[in-house]
Image (tube, rainbow, N blue to C red):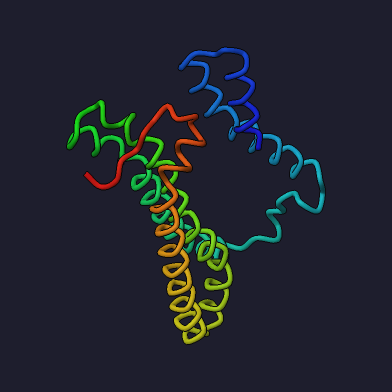
Amino acid sequence: VVGVACLLLTAVAGGGLAALSVAAGAGPLVGNLVVTLVAWRTPNLRPQMKLGSPKVARTLISMARFYFVIAVASVIGFSTAALILSAVKGAGAVSEYAATYRLFTFVPILGFLLIGGSWPAFGEAWSRGDREWVRTTFRASVRLSLLLNVVVALVLLVLAPWLINVWLANSVSPGYIT
C-alpha cells in the first residue's frame, strides 16, 4: 500500500524515471520501517531473545532457505521476460508486448496465492511428521491451482484484446500469437 501511494504521488507530481524508481524502492522500505517500529514499540510483538533457542533458530533458518530459493526463482522468472523478449524479438517488441505480459502475469499470481498461503501449514505438518497429509494436500492444491490458472488464462486469452484496449484507451493493439 505504501509503495503504491509513493508511486502515485510521484506520478501525479510529474516525477521522471529516476524519481519513479526511487519511489518504487522507497515504498516497501518505508512500509517495512513502519512495521518494524510498531513491532519494537509494542511489547507483545517485540522479539524476546530469552525465548529463543539455537535449535529453533537452526530449524527456522533451514526452512527459510527453501522459501528464499522459491522467492529468488520467482523474481528471476518475472524479471527476465523483458530481457528475453528484447533478445529474441528486438527492443521495440518489449513495449509492444508489455501490456499483454502484465495482464497475463496475473495468472501465476493466482497459483502463488492459492498454494503460498498453505506453506506454513505444510511446514507445521511436516515438522509433526504428517507427511501423508502434506503430500495429499499439496497435490490437491497444485491440481486446483492448475485448473484455476488454465481457466483464467483461457478467459484472458479471449478477453485480452478488449481488456487491453479498455485499459490503455485503444493506444495499443495487441495481436494474438505471431
Quarter of the figure with residue 161: top left
In this rendering, the answer to whether 91 lies above or below 130 is above
Instruction: Name which residue lies at 38% across and 53% down.
Output: 157
* Tag count: 0
- Residue 32 lies left or right of residue 87; in this view the side is right
x and y percent of residue 9 in the render? 64, 21
Query: From the image, which quarter does the C terminus lie in?
Result: top left
Instruction: Name which residue lies at 52% across and 62% down.
Output: 116
x and y percent of residue 13 in the render? 62, 13
Instruction: Name which residue lies at 57% across and 74% down.
Output: 124
In this rendering, the answer to whether 168 lies above or below 159 is above
Quarter of the figure with residue 56: bottom right
x and y percent of residue 72 in the render? 39, 48
Is 101 in front, or is 169?
Answer: 169
Query: From the image, which quarter does the N terminus lie in?
Result: top right
Q: Extreme left residue here?
A: 88
Is 120 in front, or is 158?
Answer: 158
x and y percent of residue 90 in the render? 20, 29
In this rendering, the answer to whether 86 lies above or below 152 is above
Instruction: Name which residue lies at 24% across and 37% down.
Output: 85
